[in-house]
Image (cartoon, helix red, strand yellow):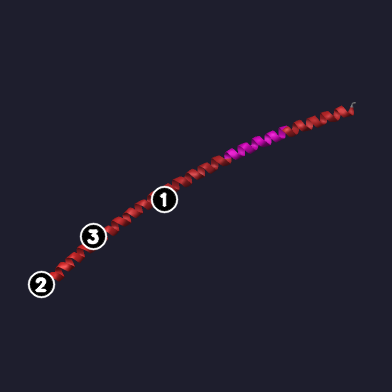
Amino acid sequence: MELTCFKESARAEYAALTNQFNMFQKQSLASKKAQQNQHNMIVDGILKMFDEYKIISEWVFHEEISKLQDEILNITERSEHEIMYLGTLRAYP
């Protein structure tokens, strides 16, 4: 009789502990999924910001290149005019 009571008590305790463990696992999994979702949202936000930065930096780069090209063309034209002027000066001493 005592042994039967002990077995029933042990089974009830085992069932309660198993139930608690299963609930803990579910809560832990839910917590980890929530953290993973937060991390994914952060990573997505960072990637979007990087893409925006990349687009803006490429635009600025191309704008600066175009300014430099214009400046080089202006310098080239001025140099050509100076060379032509010097050529005309030498032609008429």
Q: Is residue 79 magenta?
A: no
Q: Residues within 10 Å of mark 1 (few under 14, many from 20)?
A: few
Disc 3 crowd, CA 10 A, few/some/many (<14, 14-19, 20+)? few
Q: Residue 51 vs residue 39: left or right?
A: right
- Mark 1 highlights which residue? 40
Which of the marked residues, 3 or 2, is nearer the chain's N terminus? 2
Marks 3/2: CA distance?
A: 27 Å
Q: Are marks 3 and 2 in contact (CB under 8 Å)?
A: no
The kind of secondary structure the magenta stretch mainly shows is helix
The residue singled out by tag 3 in the image is 20
Judged left or right of residue 93, residue 10 is left
Q: Residues within 10 Å of mark 2 (few under 14, many from 20)?
A: few
Q: Position of residue 86 (x, y in %)?
A: 83, 29
Q: Position of residue 10 (x, y in %)?
A: 17, 68
Type of amino acid at the residue the image marks with label 3 = Gln
Quadrant assignment for the C terminus: top right
Instruction: Say which residue appears at 62% left-offset and 37% top-offset.
Output: 64
The quarter of the picture where residue 60 lies is top right
* Front disc: 1 or 3: 3
Which stretch appears magenta? 59-74
Q: Earlier in the sequence, mark 2 or mark 1?
A: 2
Q: Outermost residue, top direction?
A: 93
**Amino acid found under the numbered disc labelled 2:** Glu
Whole-percent x, y for residue 1 in the image: 9, 73
- Residue at 38% across, 49% down: 38
Q: Say whether residue 11 is left or right of residue 46.
A: left
Residue type at mark 1: give it: Asn
Q: Earlier in the sequence, mark 1 or mark 3?
A: 3
Residue ID for mark 2: 2
Q: CA distance from mark 2 to mark 1?
A: 56 Å
Mark 2, mark 1: which one is toward the viewer?
2
8 is higher (above) or lower (below) than 54:
below
